[in-house]
Amino acid sequence: MAKTILSSNHHDHKPFYVLGLFSVLLSIQEGVFEYPAEKDSVLQVTKKDYTNCNTASPMREFKDNGHTVFKFDQSGPFYFISGVEEKLCEE
């Protein structure tokens, strides 16, 4: 599965991938998702929904013209998947 998990405890400023969508962790406080706005979105989901590739009940959905800045507002893991269900469980 081409998905990613981020933690606000992450200290490197590195690229990361969410379902093949380019993203950059700018700092401990925020990350950026880049995606084709007309075709995709980014969903913040629970660990269970992440594991099961489930898009039915996201905690949050981001559709920011293909450029979403996410601010980490608490410590711990964050789970993100693509809003395009067909892409979720691709190997």
Image (cartoon, rainbow, N blue to C red):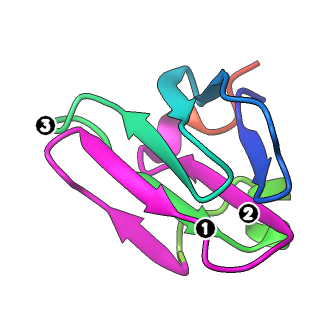
Q: Disc 2 marks which amino acid?
A: Phe
Task: Give the residue at x 32% y 31%.
Answer: 35
Label 3, secondary structure: give it.
loop
Cα separation between marks 1 and 2: 8 Å
User: What segment is highlighted magenta in the picture?
Assistant: 59-86
The residue at which mark 2 appears reads as 78
Tell me the tag on residue 38: 3
Task: Give the residue at x 61% y 67%.
Answer: 72
Mark closer to the observer (3, 1)? 1
- In percent of width and height, residue 44 lies at 57, 65
Label 2, secondary structure: give it.
strand
Task: Give the residue at x 18% y 38%.
Answer: 37
> Which residue occupies the foreground of this view, 6 or 85?
6
**Contact, mark 3 vs mark 1 (Cβ under 8 Å):** no
Q: Residues within 10 Å of mark 1 (few under 14, many from 20)?
A: some
Say if residue 45 shows up in the picture.
yes
Q: Earlier in the sequence, mark 1 or mark 2?
A: 1
